[in-house]
Amino acid sequence: MKKLFVNIGLFVIPFAVYAILVIVVDPFNYFNVSHVIPDELKAETSCRLNYRLWKMNAYRRQPTDNILLGDSRMLLLDADSISARTGETYYNFAYGGGSLDEVIETFWFADSIVSLKHVYIGLNFSMFNGYHTVNRTHQVRKVFANPLLYLIDKVMIKAGAMLVAQALFDAEYEIERPEMTPKQFWEYQVAVTARNQFERYTYPDDYYQRLSEIVSYCNDRGITVNIIIFPEHMDLINRYFELGLKEEYDRFKQDIHRLVKTHDFNYGNPITENCADFTDPYHFTTDVGLQLVDEIW
């Protein structure tokens, strides 16, 4: 019997050591008991590896009643600048590579935690496609319900290894940086990325219905809800038309404007026609982001 307990102990020890290491490094602050690795470093590394896990976990610990939802374009709006203009705290709940399905699910996630006051949704045509059904928030909810899933999560393990290498050995990682020149990446986004997004297109009736439900819900409860259509360079807008989607693009605009108050910056104007105002055809510069904040708030 003694030998059996010894063997069990020897078997368990590696797993216990591993669990302790995860709790100490804790790349996404899931357990939130150790901050040996600075949160600033985690925000730069872990967040970019899994925006959903990082942001949903942070929000459930420190919720705010004013939120920004969307993809990487909404990420370009500085929540602190908005707070400075409004006197109210805002949380940028956008995800890099976020989908409309994730935006909708994240609204209900936030609403389940706090009584919302102001909601701004970033929504461009590239997100408004019935074939875009990726939703990675569901896995995050499973992780919240079961810590064991966090311990074996591949992205968590990768983030932990990178953070340890950064903290101990000053390792540097270029996360999300394309391996091509800015000019090549611009051309790739227009020629390839846009085509891939719209190889198949169907009007997203289900998404539009779910957005309508959010708007009705907000109206009934006095929650302010707005949609922002962010500026994209005209190279990209014209590419939509080249792909035979002008009718669908126009319908998207009309339906969104009909649904709710919409701040639409995506049309021929000095910003969308100026390459210097963009880092790539989808993403405007920080200065443009501040202009949008001034315009909206």
Image (tube, helix red, strand yellow):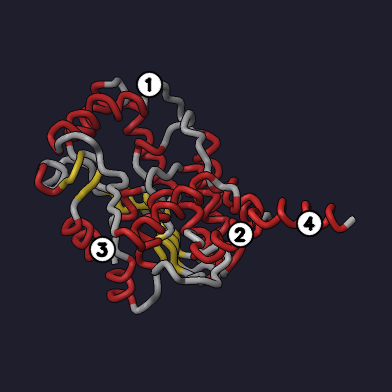
- Residue type at mark 3 is Val
Residue of label 2: 17
- Residue type at mark 2 is Val
Residue of label 1: 199
Quarter of the figure with residue 14: bottom right
Q: Compute the Cα span from label 1 to label 2.
A: 48 Å
Residue 293 numbered mark, or none: 3
Q: Residue at x 55, y 59 (%)?
A: 22
Q: Earlier in the sequence, mark 4 or mark 2?
A: 4
Q: Compute the Cα span from label 4 to label 2.
A: 16 Å
Q: Earlier in the sequence, mark 3 or mark 2?
A: 2
Residue of label 4: 6
Marks 4 & 1, CB-CB < 8 Å contact: no
Question: Is 284 placed left or right of 129 in the picture?
Answer: left
Count of labels in the image: 4
Q: Which secondary structure, mark 4?
A: helix
Marks 3 & 2, CB-CB < 8 Å contact: no
Check the image and report above or below for 161 versus 125. Answer: below
Check the image and report above or below for 192 versus 14. Answer: above
Q: Earlier in the sequence, mark 1 or mark 2?
A: 2
Between label 4 and label 3, give the one nearer the viewer: 4
- Residue type at mark 4 is Val
Q: Residue furthest front?
A: 3
> Which quadrant holds the C terminus?
bottom left
- Classify 10 Å Cα crowding around label 4: few (below 14), some (14-19), many (20 and above): few
Marks 1 & 2, CB-CB < 8 Å contact: no
Q: Which secondary structure, mark 2?
A: helix
Q: Of 70 and 62, which appears nearest the observer?
A: 62
- Residue type at mark 1 is Glu
Q: Residue at x 47, y 58 (%)?
A: 54
Q: What percent of the width, then of the height, locates residue 244? A: 30, 20
Q: Compute the Cα span from label 3 to label 1.
A: 33 Å
